[in-house]
Amino acid sequence: MRRRVLLKVEASVAMMRVGLDAALMAPAGWLAAGGSATDVRLWLVVGAIVLARGASNVINDITDIEKDRETNPWLPIPSGTVDPMQAVATLGFLSLGSVALLAIATHSLAALVASTGTMTLAAVLIAAYPYIPSGPIAMFVAACPVAAIPLTSWFAAGGGGGTAILGVVAMAWLYGVPVNLHGAVRDVDTDREIGQRTLAVRRGPRFVLAVCAAADALAHVAAAAVAWGEGRLALVGPLAVVSATITVRAYAAAIRRQEDPEVRGRFRRVSTMRRLLLARHGALILMVAAFSPGTAAILGAAAAVVLPLLRRHERRVASGGLRRALATG
């Protein structure tokens, strides 16, 4: 019984599709408001944003369930690993947990209302996204919930700190542009089969990944611009050049592999993008370094440990290992 309960909890965590993007992005907003990296409230806010990000993925799975039955049947809901009742319960727990952590972390009602309001708006955009026709507007809207991550932590810290938050939000939005576009490349074969007219279907993976590479390069420029404003360009600037070069080269390699006739299907296409998905984290760490190099170094070391564990769990879910464990547990 205990094992089954733990497996159910793991299934709920699988729906969250926990990544490090939110955890690496949130500190920049807090630090931009003049907050301290040693303040325990920052890490409560990071926890709240990670839960909210997980809730947004659950919302996406619930609203996209019919499409996912055809394009992503391995996901927890369409695969039967999680039933709709558990999905709704998970969404409720994550949402309430996120708000509770923000309530503890914020020192004023105004900060709580502004930060929870930003997260709620992001959730609304995520829920509305499947109903927006593919195109520039959809691409703009898809990136906005990512930009809301540092903005939420900035509000939670009480705002202030000058104009640095504008650069942080711009960087987060640019970083968010490829998020859904990567998904379009990943699912291009099944989308083509079922008649989904995504950008990847209409223009091809090469064009979409080139757009993503440009957005990620500009995200590094935004991080360097913020570092210049904070007086740390001498440190962050050269690192941004190195990180951007690594990221763009990873995109170039992925584009070449995507054009191989043997690369077909979701998992084969994802395998061609592993390097670039890893390289993208550099821009997030550099944004934190613009305010606190020490904090960025700690986050980078933590990411090096946690990312392989997350990939391992993702493979367990995608291969059906979790579903089989539940069936026999």
Image (cartoon, rainbow, N blue to C red):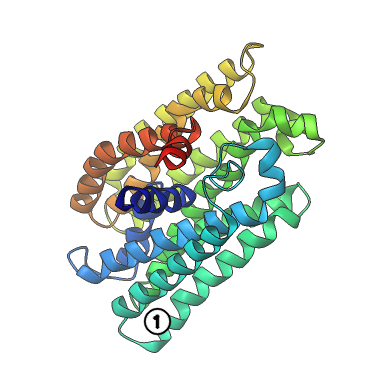
Percent x, y for residue 6? 34, 51
Question: In this image, 116 relative to 229: left or right?
Answer: right
The residue under the point 71% across, 53% down is 130
Q: Nearer the viewer, residue 78 or 251?
A: 78
Residue 255 position within the rendered picture, expressed as x and y whole percent measured from the top left: 58, 21
Q: Position of residue 285 (x, y in %)?
A: 32, 46
Task: Please tell me how many numbered marks the rendered image carries.
Answer: 1
- Residue at mark 1: 111
Instruction: From the viewer's side, name the closer residue of 292 and 264.
Output: 264
Q: Quadrant of the C terminus?
A: top left
Identified at 43% across, 58% down, the residue is 168
In the image, what residue occupies the spot 47% across and 45% down?
219
Is 57 drawn above or below residue 162 in the view shown?
A: above
Along the horizontal axis of the image, is 119 left or right of 293?
right
Q: Position of residue 33 (x, y in %)?
A: 33, 71
Q: Nearer the viewer, residue 279 or 165?
A: 279
The 10 Å Cα crowd at callout 1, few under 14, some 14 to 19, many 20 or more, is: many
The correct choice, above or below, for 84 with respect to 178 in the image is below
Residue 308 seen from this side: yes
Query: Farthest residue in the right direction?
Result: 195
Identify the element where label 1 is drawn.
helix
Residue 95's place in the image compared with 64, above or below, is below
Three-letter code for the amino acid on which mark 1 is drawn: Ala
Residue 169 visible to the viewer: no
Identity of the residue drawn at 37% across and 49% down: 4
* Outermost residue, bottom side: 109
Q: Quadrant of residue 310?
A: top left
